[in-house]
Amino acid sequence: MIESLVSFALATLLLALSPGPDNIFVLTQSVARGSKIGIAIATGLITGCIAHTSLVAFGFAIVIRDNEWLLLGIKIAGAIYLLYLAFQVFKSDPSISLKDSQTSQGNWWDMFKVGVTMNILNPKVSLFFLALLPQFVVQNDTPEWIQIYILGIIFMLVSLVVFYSIALLAGRAAMFIKNSNWFPFFMKWLQIVVFVGIAVLILIP
């Protein structure tokens, strides 16, 4: 059991470090809006994993996988939400997104909710968990659903450390260039590209 958990933790670390939609999103938002917002989004994204872990633990992820219309509906809802976020960024003044140190508690909470919603409306996370977590379940006296939750918690903790590190490093790096003339405009459009890109990735089979 211990060997399986260690192997899973190492696999999770490699996955969290590899470029993907979530860590790229945390990176761009941290550079654009500061470390606090990046941490809020990362916390929201990982919190959403609780729902996906539960779907796998109790077999609902299989229902989503095997129901094409339900899967498509969740994908479309997730893509529409991301396109809405992209439109909100498009309408905003680029300079607004760079107010890092003055971020209010309300904004932190709002971005946390964005992270949670993005994660929950991405059915590919559930399908990914469905493919990954059972591979590390071992035959012993511990019920399978409890092992799934243990693996899910490990995944969340390891990913959270990586995402927080990305947010902190990206936020610090942004401090040196945020006053440049080109940076706000560049980050505004980079955020839009990331939102639209994740929306497309969700819809791709």
Image: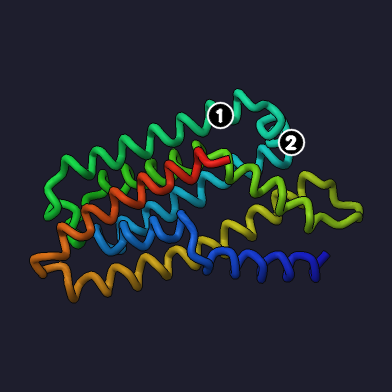
Closer to viewer: mark 1 or mark 2: 1
Q: Number of numbered discs present?
A: 2
Front residue (pair 113, 135): 135
Place of residue 105 in the rendered image (x, y in percent of width and height, measured from the top left): 26, 48
Place of residue 95 in the rendered image (x, y in percent of width and height, measured from the top left): 12, 55
At numbered mark 1, what does the secondary structure look like: helix, strand or loop?
helix
Place of residue 41 in the rendered image (x, y in percent of width and height, measured from the top left): 38, 52
Which residue is under mark 2? 58
The answer to whether mark 1 and mark 2 are in CB contact below 8 A is no
Disc 2 marks a residue whose amino acid type is: Phe
Question: Which is more N-terminal, label 2 or label 1?
Answer: 2
Q: Is residue 59 left or right of residue 44?
A: right
Q: Residue at x 86, y 57 (%)?
A: 138
Front residue (pair 101, 193): 193
Which residue is at the far left? 181
Measured Cα–Cα span from mark 1 to mark 2: 21 Å
Q: Is residue 43 left or right of residue 182?
A: right
Query: Does 147 sit above or below residue 30?
Result: above
- Which quarter of the rendered picture does the C terminus lie within? top right
Sort mark 2 into few (<14), some (14-19) or many (20+) by Cα contacts within 10 Å. Answer: few
Q: Residue at x 43, y 47 (%)?
A: 198
Q: Residue at x 38, y 58 (%)?
A: 26
Q: What is the number of the mark on residue 72?
A: 1
- Which quarter of the rendered picture does the N terminus lie within? bottom right
Disc 1 marks a residue whose amino acid type is: Leu
